[in-house]
Image (spheres, grey):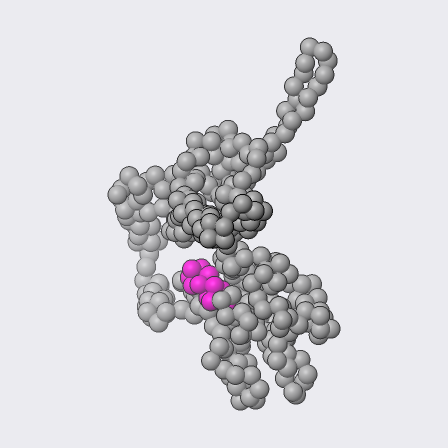
Amino acid sequence: MDKKYQVFISSTYEDLIRERQRAITAILNAEQIPAGMEAFKTGDASQKEVISKWIQQSDIYLLILGGRYGSKDEQNGISYTEWEYLKAEELNIPRFAIVLKDEYINGNLDASHSEQALPEYQQFKEKVTKNHLVSFVNSLDQLELEIMKNLPEIIKDHEESLEGWVPGHYQRDYENLRDKQNDVSDEIRQNNQDILKMVKQSSGWKDDYIGQYHFSYIKKKLEETIIPQDEFNKNLQDAIDNIVFQSSDMSKEIVEREIKNKRKQRKEQREQLPNLLEYVKVYRRELMGPGLEITQRDLIDKYYISELEQLSLAKEETIKNSTHFASGQILDSRYDSLYFTEEGKKFMTMLDELNASD
């Protein structure tokens, strides 16, 4: 039967709203059921009972640990997030954690509210990172990908013990089949298998998954992936500082106009960037064959190569060459070669089939 598994999302709330939303998106993309307690305020015993029931009814527990320890429960002196964590442990629910790296916390969250220095936070983080599956992430995209990657593995490892949710009509169908199974002969079962095989062949059914991810998810991900404006603008300030440095003979109005033009130019340059799918298509021949030589990494190479590796579509290999000269001198050189994995090749083949059918 096609079971769906409920995933309880636990974290501090107000500082991690975006992160929780991306977690919900990832769980839905993995075709599972997200559950969280955003609607409940901490500090109410009756609400704690409700949260406890939600955790008990969930199959998997997901913790997102940012830079805050969170509000404390007056009864036991620990944060409500840690209380949820311990409740899942008590109920023997499979747990995994997404831990935000310090760079992400300092660059994206309100550092003034950080509680990372608290002994309670340090003890909780140490407990989390030692006890079970943990992924350390530095972006929202990476957070989503890690959840998409780890959920199927957790389900696979604990499938026998997970209860899950089954649509009502599946249960009715199952009961009907069970009631009739004594009347079904081996010959009829074999005929059914032959018919199913013929249907699959005639309808072009195929495995639509590329590793852990569905083909449609990867295609959409590649189409939407482009270097963020903030990332693209990292060296913009250097260009502006250079304008100011050379402005001794220019009026204030000219300097401001030059800076404005530089910002506009940078924005237009980003808007003209290819998305990741277009980037892959440009270098398809190299990626499918001998490998794409990466001798100097510009911003787009760094960002896009990282995204391809996270999706397991491509990987790098360091190539070493030795040149022997008549003088006896030997010159060693090296460069990185990027090429498609089997998953990457499968994706491109399926993309070709899709384009041909259109």
The answer to whether residue 160 is magenta is: no
The answer to whether residue 23 is magenta is: yes
Q: Is residue 83 visible?
A: no
Q: Is residue 261 visible?
A: yes
Residue 199 placed where, x, y %?
28, 48
Q: Residue at x 28, y 39 (%)?
A: 356
- Residue 207 in the image: above or below residue 135: above
Q: Residue at x 60, y 31 (%)?
A: 335
Q: Residue at x 52, y 83 (%)?
A: 41
- Residue 147 in the image: above or below residue 167: above
Which of 84 and 257 lies nearest the eye of the viewer? Answer: 257
On-image quarter of the N terminus: bottom left
The residues colored magenta run 20-31
Q: Residue at x 51, y 33 (%)?
A: 292
On-image quarter of the C terminus: top left
- Residue 21 in the image: above or below residue 286: below
Q: Is the magenta region chiefly helix, strand or loop?
A: helix
Residue 269 placed where, x, y %?
43, 45
- Residue 58 in the image: above or below residue 304: below
The answer to whether residue 223 is left or right of residue 301 is left
